[in-house]
Image (tube, grey):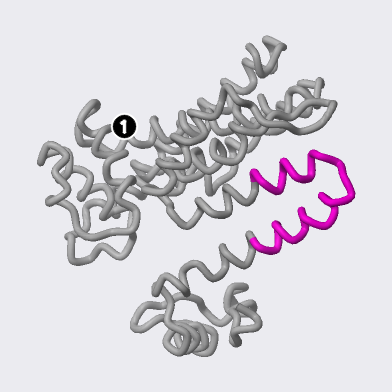
Amino acid sequence: NSVLSSAKDRNRTTILFLVHTTIALALIAGQWNDVLSQSEGLWTYDPARYYYDAHRLAESAFSSAALPSNNYMGVFYYYAAIFTIAGWNPVAPAIVNSLFTLMTILLLQRRIRNICTSDRYLLAFSSALLIPELIWFDAITSRETPAMFLFTCATLLWVKITPKGIGVSISSALPYLVSIGALMFVRGGLVVPAICAVVSTLVIGRKSRVSVLIAPALIVLTMVVAGTADYFSGTLGSDKTLKQLYDIGALGTRGSESVWNSDSLGLKVIPNTWWQI
């Protein structure tokens, strides 16, 4: 009620959410179950490993010894908690993921509510529930949905937007810090961009001459950090990675795995130099 004042618009959002969830459940039955039925040696999709590793974690009473080494440990605990409460099945994660996607959209709508009084524009955010990628990632045990929710919290909870300008919401400091901490375990590479986004927003909100100079610099810094974090952390190796990207562009394959065919758009925009990367 605090986001959409019109009962009609609330009902429309509810219908969109039910359509979103229904399609997600249909994807489970039509495709996701087939992926999960593969033997462990055939898994080439991370969410399938998350599904089974989270189950092992739940069965071991949340002992980290049951998990392989991974940069996204928080994802395992997230799904293990769901399996502990609702049992080991692919439906429960899809429903919980869909609820988190809905909360993400409602948070966006609530933050904009103070500067946008028309429910018509706020309702446009609800239509994001029908974006195919959101539905797919909600249907499977992916890291994208919890990461999206936490990143949204980490960039919006501490920012207070009003017609008079942009400020800090002191009452939201604790939830903000919790979301930043959780984001470190779910998708650590997003923490620095999230903090830079908050700082940039607050600087822009000051409406001063200094902010005109500082804000663009912070935005560029965020892009540089986000683009090079994997490289400096050792995830990427310069010669090896560049050769792999070139091979994908030239051959349409990654090792023995087919990535694109000759007509794929991705093949035409693959970077071949570090400057393009």
| Residue at the front extreme, as displayed | 210
Which segment did they paint magenta?
198-221
Indicate the position of residue 187 as horizontal and vertical percent values: 43, 52
Residue 51 lies left or right of residue 245; in this view the side is left
Tell whether position 178 is magenta.
Answer: no
Q: State whether residue 205 is above or below residue 87.
A: below
Foreground pick, 269 / 15 = 269
Q: State whether residue 173 is above or below residue 147.
A: above
Q: Disc 1 marks which amino acid? A: Ala
Foreground pick, 172 / 244 = 172
Residue underneath mark 1: 92
> Quadrant location of the C terminus?
bottom right
Question: Residue shown at 27%/46% (left/top)?
Answer: 76
Q: State whether residue 165 is above or below residue 196.
A: above
Q: How many marks?
A: 1
Q: State whether residue 96 is above or below residue 189.
A: above
Question: Residue shown at 30%/65% (left/top)?
Answer: 44
| Residue at the right extreme, as displayed | 209
Magenta stretch, overall SS: helix
Question: Residue shown at 44%/34% (left/top)?
Answer: 178
